[in-house]
Image (spheres, coloured by chain):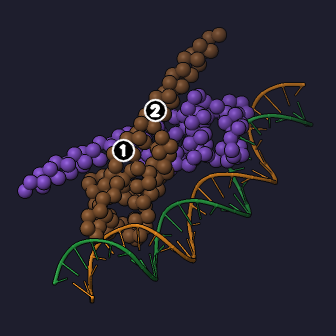
Chain colours: A brown, B purple, C green, D orange
DNA sequence: ACTGTCCGTAAGTTGAAACTTACCGTTAGT
DNA sequence: ACTAACGGTAAGTTTCAACTTACGGACAGT
């Protein structure tokens, strides 16, 4: 908890979303992620740090490189938060609709 | 489409999330939303505009006030995007796990 | 018509975050 | 040991968004 917020903030940035989407298809070292990106490698590195702190990716060392991959955990928490929100919002919507119908003919 | 991104960016801001969470329990005019908030009423107004442009809330005029309420539409799109992401990420995860198992005994 | 309430918008300030370049440590290969 | 590849971190710049105050327009009641 208080974890979805950082995940939300992490995914808000377009460049970071691009990094994340590249990881969607499988793990990758930093250099490969950065190549073909509109920003420099250090920038990608910094984005990866944010994603990691948000629990959205994990890092694994392999020799001189660091392999990053998506962490289903963080994504799951975000999904849970959204679902909960979705449910209560729909409840409020329904309750209000019924109330409105009651007021229509007083 | 290209709608989840603005929704994501909208919900990334803590104050805006606070506004949105207040609407979670039912519709409200701006003044009531702003009262008891850590920011001024104009600030809340500006946040509501962003939420509206992201398709997360709707606005209805009632005399001199504007009633804001959550728009399930925007929330649904965001949820759909996340679900899709979730699915493909899990697929990649599974595929990689199998590949890893195959490499374990070559 | 006058007054008060409600709220959106304009204009300006400020702090944070997304970049860049430069640098350094670590690992692997020869 | 030397060298090259890989990538994290420091420092500095710049852009942008979140706020403030000030203002004005629309509606409701008297």
* Disc 1: CA contacts within 10 A as few (<14), some (14-19) or many (>=20): few
Q: Residue furthest left?
A: B106
Nearer the observer, A16 or B4: A16
* Place of residue A67 in the rendered image (x, y in percent of width and height, measured from the top left): 29, 61
> Disc 2 or 1, which lies upstream in sequence?
1
Question: In the rendered structure, the residue with mark 1 lies on which chain?
Answer: A
On screen, residue C27 above or below B56: below
Q: Quadrant of the C terminus of chain A?
A: top right
Q: Is residue B32 left or right of residue A79?
A: right
Nearer the observer, B12 or C2: B12
On screen, residue A81 above or below C15: above
Q: Marks 2/1: CA distance?
A: 17 Å
Q: Is residue B7 visible?
A: no
Name the residue rendered at 45%, 48% in the picture.
Answer: A7
Q: Which residue is mark 2?
A: A84
Per the rendering, the mark at residue B96 is none
Q: Which residue is mark 1?
A: A73
Name the residue rendered at 26%, 54% in the picture.
Answer: A26
Task: Say if mark 2 contacts mark 1, CB within 8 Å.
Answer: no
Q: Quadrant of residue C2?
A: top right
Q: Is residue D11 left or right of residue A56?
A: right
Q: Is residue C29 left or right of residue B53?
A: left
On screen, residue D10 above or below B99: below
């Amino acid at each position: 908890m208080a974890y979805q917020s950082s995940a939300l903030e992490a995914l808000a940035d377009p460049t970071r979303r691009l990094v994340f989407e590249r990881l969607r298809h499988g793990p990758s070292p930093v250099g490969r992620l950065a190549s073909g990106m509109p920003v420099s490698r250090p920038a990608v590195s910094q984005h990866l740090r944010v994603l990691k702190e948000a629990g959205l990716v994990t890092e694994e060392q392999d020799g001189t490189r660091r392999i990053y991959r998506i962490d289903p955990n963080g994504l799951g928490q975000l999904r849970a938060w959204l679902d909960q929100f979705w449910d209560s919002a729909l409840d409020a919507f329904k309750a209000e609709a019924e109330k409105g119908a009651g007021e229509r003919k007083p």
